[in-house]
Amino acid sequence: MSVHSYLLYFLPVFAVMIAVEYAIGRKRGIKIYTKDQSIASLVIAVGQRLIGLIPFSFVGIAWFFAYENRLFNLSTESWWYIPALFLGLEFFYYWFHRLSHEVRWFWATHSVHHSIEEMNFLAAYRFGWTGRISMASIVYTPLCFFGFSPTHVVVMLAINLMYQSWLHTNLIGKLGPLEGIINTPSAHRVHHAKNADYLDRNHGGVLMIFDRLFGTYVPERDDVPVEYGLIKPPGTTNPIRIAFHEWGNIINDVKQYRIRDWPMLLFGPPGWAPNGDGMTSAQLRESYRAKALHGTQKADQELQQIA
Ligand SMILES: [Zn+2]
Ligand SMILES: [Zn+2]
């Protein structure tokens, strides 16, 4: 069974969550769900599920091959089996997610999840359709090689994704001492932001500890309100165009640039362009900081002049 098929069991809880969020929004007079965006999220979620019924996956074959040749025969009876699987999966989820942001081939699928421009529980299920082509899940293969069965990896991954459903909301504020330890709605809002300071941050699933360890944790700031969506938005609510938006960008770039640039255009960071005139996260952050610094220097000079 695929990861997302397990999420179907969660559907009743999920429906209640959406209904409650919608009702709170109406009561407070806030528009949490707009019609076109919600239909797009729903169609993308259903489409993703239907595509998931195709019973063939290269990554699945790699996982089973790794498990057949595993290093250890782990006892599922041991007290540490589930905690070790949880922590191991969280570690590889961090890298799966981080690489889904830093490698354009993987981003082509994951960017669909980041196309949401309004944060709500329904948007949590906007998953890309082309995971079987991007194959970012190959990142989990070492878990199977270590000795965890592919089925157990899939179940733990499904639990991890179920946990993340409640993170997609603007209604829950900061959670005090839990911030920076577990993944919270506040931490995940930052993850979905396109502000230069927030880009490609907070990749953890249930925990934030690997973000802190590898330097990608950023807390939500009151003075930097989150702006949701993509740097280059699809500019449409057509679900099919959203699902293939980044693949279209890749094809355009490949046509435009020389063959020797193709490896970076396909597997380099999203936004990369030859001659350094691209807009990668690192470049965006740098130019934002330079502008901010310039602004501060200008303000300092003005202050000195006044003084
Ligand atoms: Zn992401
Ligand atoms: Zn998300």
Image (tube, helix red, strand yellow):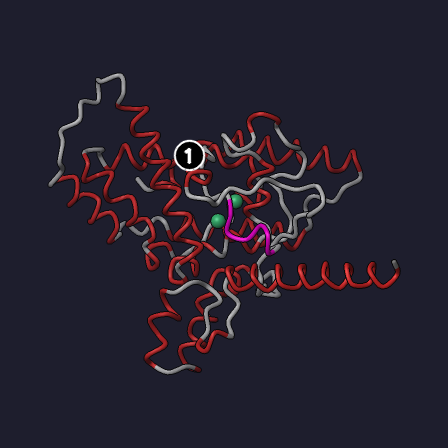
Determine if residue 45 is in view.
no
As drawn, is 200 to the left or to the right of 99? right
Can you identify the residue that label 1 sits on?
160
Q: Secondary structure at mark 1?
A: helix
Residue occupying image coordinates x 37% and y 41%: 93
Q: Main secondary structure of the magenta part?
A: loop
Residue occupying image coordinates x 39% and y 53%: 99
Q: Given the current orientation, which residue lies at the most extreme right position?
A: 306
Q: Position of residue 207 (x, y in %)?
A: 45, 33
Residue 141 position by quadrant: top left
Residue occupying image coordinates x 17% and y 26%: 74
Q: Position of residue 49 (x, y in %)?
A: 42, 47
Q: Position of residue 140 (x, y in %)?
A: 29, 43
Q: Quadrant of the C terminus?
A: bottom right
Q: Position of residue 260 (x, y in %)?
A: 32, 79
Determine if residue 110 is in view.
yes
Q: Residues within 10 Å of mark 1 (few under 14, many from 20)?
A: some
Q: Is residue 1 magenta?
A: no
Q: What are the residue bounds of the magenta stretch?
A: 196-201
The three-letter amino acid code for the residue at tag 1 is Asn
